[in-house]
Image (cartoon, grey):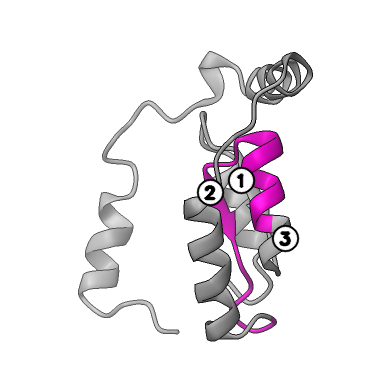
Amino acid sequence: CGTGIGINTAAQKVKGVRGACVADVQTAVAAKENLNANVIGCGGRVVGIGSIEYILEAFLKAEYKPTPEKDALIAKIDGMIGENDCIGNDAIFDEFNKKWDEGFYHD
């Protein structure tokens, strides 16, 4: 993803994902510590690979710091995707993965 926005938006459509679009170490750490983010998206065109490595390392080392207020906010965020809104077909992307493996899609 060029900016990180598209991939992060897509990831957040999956029930249980709390994603954050980040471009620096501090934002990645804050996403984990405050919102218990479990996915981050970085823009490959706007953030250099070296920075992304530092961001990822800091995110993986960071730990959620729970408070009742943070837990309530996370529960509210998690509740925004209803049980019927999640994908129930585990094979939904099989066709696209096969095409990818066969070279149908190009970067």
Circle 3: residue type = Gln
Is 30 situated above or below 97?
A: above
Is 39 situated above or below 46?
A: above
> Which residue in the protein does label 1 denote?
19
Label 2: how many residues lie within 10 Å, few (<14), some (14-19) or many (20+)? Answer: some
Asked if labels 2 and 1 touch by Cβ distance under 8 angstroms, the answer is yes
Residue at image position (29%, 70%) is: 100
Residue ranking furthest to the right: 69
Label 1: how many residues lie within 10 Å, few (<14), some (14-19) or many (20+)? Answer: many
Mark 3 vs mark 1: give the one in front: 3
Circle 1: residue type = Gly
Instruction: Give left or right: position of 14 versus 72.
Output: left
> Which residue in the protein does label 3 denote?
26
Kindly state the secondary structure of the residue where label 1 is placed: strand
Residue at image position (26%, 40%) is: 91
Give the mark nearer the N terminus: 3 vs 1.
1
Image quadrant containing the N terminus: bottom right
Is 34 contained in the magenta span? yes
Residue 30: x percent and y percent? Answer: 71, 48
| Residue stretch in magenta | 28-46
> Which residue in the protein does label 2 denote?
39
Instruction: Give left or right: position of 81 versus 86.
Output: right
